[in-house]
Image (cartoon, grey):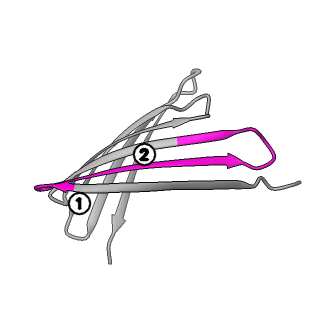
């Protein structure tokens, strides 16, 4: 079985307005040997390096589109929540992660 090959390129841009940091990101990926191309676009706003709100969109996948999330950081602990709705009666995904900055 041949493993799939993929090439991906992307970039981010961020800027600050007082206590809020805004970030935007985009990425393009292509599966080599096929005509499948994906585009991902996302953004986040971070208030006082503590509270984060995120939005994203992904093309090229029939069951996915928009996603949203929030995050909170206290000291060295970060808790993130993401909601990813799926179409075609696949259901929805709710993800929670906990990170530690040591």
Q: Residue 81: within the magenta?
A: no
Q: Is residue 38 above or below residue 10?
A: above
Q: Quadrant of the N terminus?
A: bottom right
Report the side of 53 relative to 85 (left or right).
left
Q: Which residue is mark 2?
A: 95
Mark 2–mark 1 distance (CA, rounded to whole Å): 17 Å
- The picture places residue 54, in percent across and down from the top left corner, at 32, 44
Q: Is residue 3 above or below residue 55?
A: below
Q: Badge 1: how crowded within 10 Å, few (<14), some, or many (20+)?
A: some
Q: Residue 35: within the magenta?
A: yes
Magenta part of the chain: 16-39
Q: Which residue is mark 1?
A: 73
Residue positioned 42% across, 45% down in the render: 95
Residue positioned 80% across, 56% down in the render: 3
50 or 16, nearer to the observer = 16
Report the side of 32 relative to 11 (left or right).
right
Residue positioned 61% across, 54% down in the render: 8
């Amino acid at each position: 079985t041949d493993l799939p090959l993929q090439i991906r390129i992307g970039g981010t841009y961020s800027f600050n307005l007082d206590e809020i940091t805004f970030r935007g990101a985009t990425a393009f990926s292509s599966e080599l040997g096929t005509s499948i191309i994906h585009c991902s676009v996302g953004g986040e706003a971070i208030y006082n390096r503590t509270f984060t709100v995120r939005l994203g969109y992904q093309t090229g996948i029939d069951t996915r589109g928009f996603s949203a999330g929030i995050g909170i950081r206290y000291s060295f602990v970060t808790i993130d929540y993401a909601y990813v709705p799926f179409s075609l009666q696949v259901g929805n995904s709710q993800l929670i992660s906990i990170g530690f900055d040591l």
